[in-house]
């Protein structure tokens, strides 16, 4: 059995963020058009965390993959990432394993790229200020993807302790010296005057006050992934429109929306799959003053199509 191992470094080398955004935009369109076979992911909880098993097959692209991803919130206390993952790419014609990819790196890349595709469709084109909640393993890609699609001049980073926020700010300054990165001390300081807000935390409680959100803001909710988690409080946001990566997945896992629906503040028939916007079937932002909210729970189609694209590029390089 000849299974190629694709490292985190190779993932970055073969699929830069701008190109990953295009792949994930196609993945969202495939979901909206029903062009994938993607069972609801299976979650297995242990004492310290949860492991998710996520298969997907995309007939049009021929991508077939299974991801195993574990989220263990206490890991940073041990100097470990919160998230570990592995992606198995399978030959759709024979069922033979083709490759094993570093799923931790691929997850961060495809999650960031998906948010970039949604932000490009929904955020105001003149957005200049990004407020970022969370500074963990996926946070750098969340910054990179927004910088790829909007002319950001300032990034405000908030974490409760501030330590990881300052580390991330220092790290990103070396990559993007033309952008002002700064740690802020309160959620309000981060949000007030921001054009885009991205939340990538595992918080079960809202991380900012909706009263601080200005008209015309675009919000990305990335971190929460269970019905009990609610890092973004959408109740109280005027002229709000809600978008998701997958309606099926959001109904099962997007606590930010599930709880708002249960409270009577949002209806599921008002929620739009972002793939319908990216395909041109429905409009994105309709007015400058609208507040748009994109909820990403992460879908296996993204993993399959991102892994498939990386594998094809690696194979082409080796054969040429």
Image (cartoon, rainbow, N blue to C red):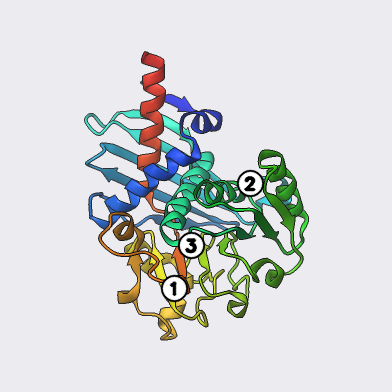
Q: Is residue 282 left or right of residue 49?
A: left
Label 2 secondary element: loop
Q: Residue 222 at x, y = what percent?
A: 51, 59
- Residue at left offset 75%, top offset 48%: 167
Q: Nearer the viewer, residue 110 or 64?
A: 110
**Picture residue at 62% right of the left edge, 56% below the top:** 73
In percent of the image, x 30 and y 39: which residue is there? Answer: 64
Q: Nearer the viewer, mark 2 or mark 1?
A: 1
Q: Residue at x 71, y 52 (%)?
A: 181
Report, in whole angstroms, how far the alpha carbon at label 2 lies from the one at label 3: 33 Å
For the residues bearing labels 2 and 3, Cβ distance under 8 angstroms: no
Q: CA distance from mark 3 to mark 1?
A: 23 Å
**Percent from the top left, x then y, of residue 101?**
46, 33
- Looking at the picture, does residue 137 appear above or below residue 131? above
Task: Select label 3 or label 1 by which is in front.
Answer: 3
Question: How far across and how far down the image is residue 285, in percent?
Answer: 40, 66
In the picture, the quarter occupied by the N terminus is top left
User: Does residue 4 sit above or below 30 in this rendering?
Assistant: above
Q: Earlier in the sequence, mark 2 or mark 1?
A: 2
Q: Is residue 211 left or right of residue 96?
A: right
* Depth order, front residue of 176/126: 126
> Could you say which disc has been placed on residue 81 in the image?
2
Q: Earlier in the sequence, mark 3 or mark 1?
A: 3
Q: Which residue is mark 1?
A: 257
Q: State which quadrant residue 175 falls in.
A: top right
Question: How many other residues sit within 10 Å of disc 2, few (<14), some (14-19) or many (≥20)?
Answer: some
Marks 3,1: beta carbons within 8 A: no
Residue 200 occupies quadrant: bottom right
- Residue placed under numbered mark 3 in the picture: 124
Residue 225 visible in rendering: yes
Element at label 1: helix
Neighbor class of circle 3 (other Cα within 10 Å; few <14, some 14-19, many 20+) is many
């Amino acid at each position: 059995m000849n299974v190629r191992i694709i490292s985190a470094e190779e993932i970055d080398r073969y699929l830069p963020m701008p190109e990953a955004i295009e792949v994930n935009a196609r993945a969202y369109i495939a979901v909206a058009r029903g062009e994938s076979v993607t069972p609801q992911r299976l979650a297995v909880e242990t004492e310290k965390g949860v492991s998710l098993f996520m298969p997907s097959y995309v007939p049009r692209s021929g991508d077939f993959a299974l991801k195993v991803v574990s989220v263990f919130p206490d890991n940073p206390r041990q100097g470990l990432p919160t998230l570990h993952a592995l992606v198995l790419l399978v030959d759709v014609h024979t069922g033979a394993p083709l490759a094993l990819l570093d799923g931790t790196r691929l997850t961060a890349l495809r999650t960031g790229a998906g948010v970039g595709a949604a932000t490009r469709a929904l955020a105001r084109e003149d957005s200049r200020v990004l407020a970022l909640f969370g500074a963990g393993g996926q946070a750098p890609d969340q910054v990179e993807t927004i910088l790829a699609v909007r002319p950001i001049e300032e990034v405000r980073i908030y974490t409760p302790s501030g330590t990881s926020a300052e580390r991330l700010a220092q790290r990103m300054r070396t990559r993007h010296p033309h952008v002002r990165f700064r740690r802020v001390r309160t959620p309000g300081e981060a949000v007030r005057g921001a054009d885009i807000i991205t939340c990538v935390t595992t918080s079960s409680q809202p991380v900012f006050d909706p009263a601080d959100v200005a008209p015309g803001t675009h919000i990305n909710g990335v971190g929460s992934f269970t019905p009990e988690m609610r890092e973004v409080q959408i109740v109280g946001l005027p002229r709000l429109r809600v978008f998701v990566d997958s309606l099926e997945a959001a109904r099962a896992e997007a606590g930010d929306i599930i709880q708002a629906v249960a409270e009577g503040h949002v209806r599921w028939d008002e929620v739009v799959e972002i793939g319908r916007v990216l395909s041109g079937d429905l409009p994105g932002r309709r007015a400058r003053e609208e507040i748009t909210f994109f909820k990403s729970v992460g879908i296996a189609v993204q993993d399959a199509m991102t892994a498939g694209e990386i594998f094809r590029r690696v194979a082409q390089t080796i054969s040429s």
